[in-house]
Structure formats: structure tokens, C-alpha cells
């Protein structure tokens, strides 16, 4: 399973098509089934400099993987649901990720497999969790079953709990540092310098073992194994991971967020005064 961003993308079809060819050549050598998840690089967001990027990259995606950008399957009594958080980010305005049509399909899929012993949800952008549509769906539909959610996008690992369920944002496996652009500017050579596991920046694969009590998560890194909940918003050193993801919101995290936000505002004001 993946959580998206398998190619660099964000370019015209003539550029991303060879990237997809390279990717499928690699994944075709894998013995186990390989499941693709749409990321914002696989299918881009339309914006002024690329007004039809979403539609064009979607067209290339379909050439390689078929018409459905979101899908589901059952395996040993577990329901796997793959969502597309880029579906509504086309040339229409306003843009949104998961559309009403996809939410309707999601609900229908869950109802169809009400007997699943667990549900695994895979999606790319955890920002979706903060939308009113997602929170409404969590409370009215997802909360009726046992489930776990895996996302990506941020290039940071973090473990969160929402409504008593476990949510994971995965790090990278050969990707850039999330804060590399901030720390190193335009020096792309240094963007790969990951800050370390304390920041949730490490090359890793996530290993999930399904037990009778539910999934057990471990992270396989080059220098060891880390438990699934090793990094939370309470102990992360990465300021970028302090957006309160837990639901209900963790008061300790909120206080940390306020203090860092105030400190950064003070620094910004001091820098402005110097100028």
C-alpha cells in the first residue's frame, strides 16, 4: 500500500508520462500486489501557472491505472478503502479535495461491507481531516465501525488520535525533507538531509500486522524499528507538526501551539522592526 506522490509530477503530460512509465517499470518487478494512491504530484492541482494541470495529469493517470482514482477491496475480512483527495482540485472554483460524489461512494462501500472486521483507509492529504465534510463523515459514518487511517503529503511522520481511532501521517522513503526548503533555500542537494526521527523525518516503511485486537504498527528505518505511536504532537520537535490533529483536541498540544505561534510572531515583529 502507498499514500501517494509516487512521481514528481506537477508538469505537462509530455513530462509526467515518462515518469509514470519509469514508475510502472519499477513496480512491475514487485511480487506482491502494488496499490496506488493519488497524491498531489501524481494528479496535480490546477492553478494559474497550470490552469488545467488536474485534468491533464488525471488523463495520464487513467492511461496507466484505469478510470477509478478511488477504490476498495477486501482481504481476509479487512476492508481497504483508497481515497482520492485531488478529485475536486480541477479548473473549477472553488476547489475541494474529496467531492460529494466520492463521499457518497465511500458511505455506500462501508454499508456494503458492514461485516468487515476492520477498515483501513488510505489517502494522501491529512488537511482533509480539518474540513467540515470529513469531520461530519467521521462522526456520522466512520464512527460506527473499527477503522485506521493512513495519510502522507507532509513528509513528516506523526501519530494522532481522533474519536478514539488511530490516524497516521507517514514520512518518506527516499523523499525530500519537509523543512528542507526553509532551512536550505534553493540548494536542492541539501533538501534530502532529513532532520531525524525526533522530527518525524526519516526514510522508513510502515509495517502493519493485523491481529484480533486490531492493527499493530511499526516503522522500519535503516537503523532500527520505531513503534507506531513513537511520535505525537506532544513530543515532536517539529513545529510544523503542531497543527492540532487529535479530535477531541489535546489541550497540551493546543498550549504548545499557542506558545510557538506567539514566539514566531515576536520574532517576525523584531525582524520587521530591524528593517
Image: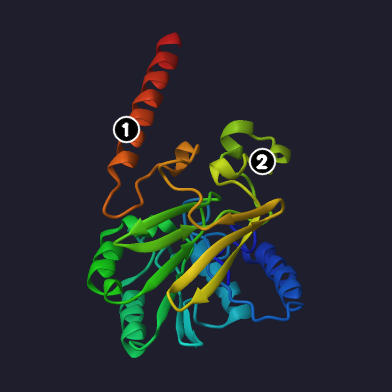
Taking the spot 63% from the left edge, 66% from the top edge, the residue there is 13
Residue 4's x, y, as percent?
56, 64
In which quadrant of the rendered view does residue 147 lie? bottom left
Q: Residue furthest top?
A: 274
Check disc 2: other Cα within 10 Å, few if <14, some if 14-19, many if 20+.
Answer: some
Q: Decide: is 238 above or below 66.
A: above
In which quadrant of the rendered view does residue 213 lie? bottom left
In which quadrant of the rendered view does residue 167 lie? bottom left
Check disc 1: other Cα within 10 Å, few if <14, some if 14-19, many if 20+.
Answer: few
Residue 243's x, y, as percent?
38, 44
Indicate which disc residue 191 carries: 2
Determine whether the residue tagged by mark 1 lies in a helix, strand or loop. helix
Indicate which disc residue 258 carries: 1
The residues tagged by marks 2 and 1 sit, at their Cα atoms, a distance apart of 28 Å
Taking the spot 27% from the left edge, 76% from the top edge, the residue there is 144
Residue 145's x, y, as percent?
31, 77
Quadrant of image for the N terminus: bottom right
Taking the spot 62% from the left edge, 42% from the top edge, the residue there is 196
Q: Is residue 260 visible?
A: yes
Q: Decide: is 6 above or below 82.
A: above
Q: Which of 158 and 60 is in front in this view?
A: 158
Q: In this view, does 204 lie to the left or right of 216?
A: right
- Counting residues from the N terminus, which is met first, the one under dot 2 or under dot 1? 2
Quadrant of image for the C terminus: top left
Taking the spot 28% from the left edge, 49% from the top edge, the residue there is 249
Q: Is residue 241 left or right of residue 25?
A: left
Q: Can residue 86 be seen in this view?
A: no
Amino acid at each position: 500500500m502507498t499514500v501517494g506522490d509516487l512521481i514528481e509530477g506537477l508538469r505537462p503530460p509530455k513530462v509526467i508520462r515518462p515518469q509514470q512509465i519509469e514508475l510502472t517499470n519499477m513496480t512491475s518487478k514487485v511480487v506482491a500486489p502494488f496499490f496506488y494512491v493519488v497524491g498531489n504530484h501524481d494528479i496535480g492541482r490546477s492553478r494559474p501557472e497550470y490552469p488545467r494541470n488536474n485534468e491533464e495529469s488525471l488523463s495520464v493517470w487513467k492511461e496507466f491505472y484505469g478510470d477509478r482514482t478511488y477504490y476498495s477491496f477486501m482481504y481476509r475480512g479487512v476492508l481497504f478503502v483508497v481515497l482520492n483527495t485531488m478529485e475536486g482540485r480541477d479548473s473549477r472554483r472553488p476547489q475541494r479535495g474529496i467531492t460529494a460524489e466520492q463521499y457518497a461512494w465511500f458511505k455506500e462501500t462501508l454499508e456494503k461491507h458492514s461485516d468487515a472486521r476492520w477498515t483501513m483507509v488510505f489517502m494522501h492529504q491529512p488537511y482533509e481531516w480539518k474540513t467540515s465534510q470529513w469531520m461530519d463523515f467521521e462522526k456520522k459514518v466512520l464512527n460506527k465501525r473499527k477503522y485506521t487511517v493512513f495519510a502522507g503529503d507532509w513528509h513528516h511522520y506523526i501519530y494522532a488520535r481522533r474519536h478514539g481511532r488511530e490516524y497516521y501521517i507517514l514520512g518518506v522513503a527516499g523523499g525530500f525533507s519537509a523543512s528542507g526548503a526553509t532551512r536550505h533555500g534553493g540548494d536542492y542537494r541539501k533538501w534530502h538531509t532529513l532532520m531525524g526521527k525526533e522530527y518525524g523525518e526519516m526514510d522508513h516503511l510502515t509495517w502493519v500486522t493485523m491481529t484480533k485486537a486490531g492493527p499493530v504498527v511499526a516503522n522500519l528505518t535503516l537503523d532500527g524499528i520505531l513503534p507506531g505511536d513513537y511520535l505525537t504532537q506532544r513530543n515532536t520537535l517539529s513545529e510544523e507538526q503542531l497543527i492540532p490533529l487529535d479530535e477531541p483536541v489535546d489541550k497540551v498540544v493546543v498550549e504548545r501551539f499557542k506558545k510557538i505561534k506567539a514566539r514566531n510572531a515576536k520574532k517576525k515583529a523584531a525582524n520587521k522592526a530591524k528593517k
